[in-house]
Amino acid sequence: MADGKWFPDLAPDVPLAEAARRVLDVRLRIVQACLPRATYEPDRDLEHVHQLRVGTRRADAALRIFRECLPGKVYKPARQRLRGVRRAAGEARDWDVFLLALRAREKGLTEADRPGIDFLIGYALGQRVAAQAHLEAADREHGQGLDTFVLETLEAVRTPNEGPSTIPLVGLARPLVSRLLDDLERAASGDLRDYDHLHQVRIAGKRLRYAMEVFGDCFGPDFTRRLYPMIEEMQEVLGRANDSHVAGVRLGGLRDRLKTCCPAEWARFKPGIEGLLRSHQRRLPQERKRFVKWWEAWKAAGAREVLATVPARPNAAESALPKKGVE
């Protein structure tokens, strides 16, 4: 696929080092392609920034998945480079999402609400301009020489030090995905009324999703046709919850500053800002409930049984598996 999500020709018996090169080549070059568009053409399409953030996440996930195929002197700087771009893209995207929500709320505003929403739009636009400057700085720091960086990273890929030189991809797939399922289950067992726990579930879900995209052909058809769409659904639910949490924190802090430093203006802005804040405060528990419902369906979906469809792998390959999973 053009977005590099799936690797339909990555068969279970492909040697691990070869799989690493193929996945990293696609994922890193997507970042290379998306960075200039997000940096210099953000107004042409808001998706440019979104694609860059997702591209850096997928590329970083690929590095973590194949970390044992890279020497530390290559692995760590590569992750640092991606992290710098991802954070700048994430900041810009967060303000894009906030602005989109404000624009949607403009429809049907009361006269009392409009001053507050107009203020928030102006404030968010200012923050978005600053975020774009941060993205441009990240491009100057991390974007230069990306082609050389990609080539050097691919050239550094090697078979893990321990074990045979023909470790197959499937020898990594099942234990790693199994560990990621364990991580998701542990995170979901926490008190989901605490946003920190809910956020850990979201992180665990992302890591599982990105691994599923790499290992799609190592499992039976239910893996990509049934389980993956469920993970996508979970990410949408928790994404909305995250958006409301971030907006709630942002609006609450802004409200407190306005009340202190600009009491006269606050009287005009209060209806719009507090009305928006209340809507996010209502949505967060609603999305928690949707996640709980999703979780019951997920537990009944038989993910462990789907993992059992992986072809048997040689004992030598199994013993040589990396001990660490996706971070």
Image (spheres, helix red, strand yellow):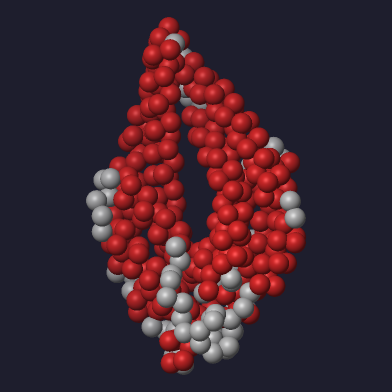
Residue 125 higher or lower than 204, as above or below: above
In depth, the one of 300 and 136 nearer the eye is 136
In the rendered view, tell whether residue 224 sits above or below residue 264: below
Left or right: 92 in relation to 149: left
- Image check: 154 left or right of 311? right
| Residue for point 40% across, 9% down | 263
For image coordinates 52% across by 19% down, the residue present is 119
Q: Position of residue 277 (x, y in %)?
A: 38, 28
Given the current orientation, which residue lies at the most extreme front position? 73
Looking at the rendering, in which quadrant would you find the C terminus?
Answer: bottom left
Position of residue 178 measured from the top left corner of the image (x, y, whole percent):
38, 74
How many numbered marks, from 0 up? 0
Viewer-closest of 81 and 55: 81
Q: Please identify the quarter of the rendering in which residue 283 is found.
A: top left
Vertical side of 141 occupied by 25: above or below: below
Tell me if residue 10 comes above or below residue 122 in the rendering.
Answer: below
Asked whether residue 199 is in view, the answer is yes
Kindly tell me whether residue 35 is visible in this rendering.
no
Residue at left 53%, top 70%?
67
Taking the spot 62% from the left edge, 54% from the top edge, the residue there is 81
Q: Position of residue 124 (x, y in %)?
A: 55, 28
Which quadrant is home to the N terminus?
bottom right
Q: Quadrant of residue 126?
A: top right
